[in-house]
Amino acid sequence: MSPSHPPSNARLIVGVSGSPGSLTALARAAEEARRRRAELWPVLAWEPPDATLAARKSSTAAALTEDWERHARERLLKALRGMFGSTEFGLAGQALITRGVPGPALVRIADRDTDVLVIGAGRRGRLRRALWPSVSRHCLAHATCPVLAVPPSPLQATLDTAHRRNLLHLRLDVRHIEGQCQTP
């Protein structure tokens, strides 16, 4: 890096769960980090499936908590390998896993004025919105730094339709998909 362009102390913190929306956000965050000469911090927040079990002070609960944490680490590493071809992403920064509810955990980590929090803003139907809290909505409402909400890939709707048709054992018409996948 040339002396006229010193690295910034900015961080792009991106929520990564392994979902297609989070991978789209990770790709955009990496692009922004390169452009801004900023650090990239992919973060996977995890919670034990049963908080009451994990809160117990038994050796079984401790072993289960270690398993859940290992699983979270493996999910993050798998996402990084899928995106960058390895767990090294070629940028300053660090990947980290944290225990906690994803929205509040991301807001807590993105605590500097120079941070940018990058989140996937996937499509959510009424049922999903009613049953599961939205990480992106929490971050947009509570973050003290700028938030970049990345829309889903244009192919996500096509993938969702194909998945639904497959589950229902319906015939899949790929003519419209082929046109979207052709290279220029």
Image (cartoon, rainbow, N blue to C red):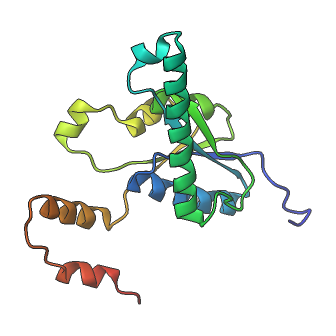
- Residue projecting furthest to the bottom: 184
Q: Visible in this render: residue 24?
A: yes
Whether residue 179 is situated above or below residue 158 in the rendered picture: below
Would residue 103 be found to the left or right of residue 146 on screen? left
Q: Visible in this render: residue 150?
A: no
What residue do we see at 33% from left, 81% from top?
A: 181
Question: Residue 13 in the image: x percent, y percent?
Answer: 60, 44
Quadrant containing the C terminus is: bottom left
Q: Looking at the image, which is closer to me, 72 or 24?
A: 72
Question: Residue 94 in the image: x percent, y percent?
Answer: 70, 46
Answer with the quarter of the image where residue 174 lies: bottom left
- Residue projecting furthest to the top: 57
Q: Looking at the image, which is closer to me, 19 or 120?
A: 19
Question: Residue 111 in the image: x percent, y percent?
Answer: 64, 31
- Residue projecting furthest to the front: 59
What residue do we see at 69% from left, 58% from top?
A: 36
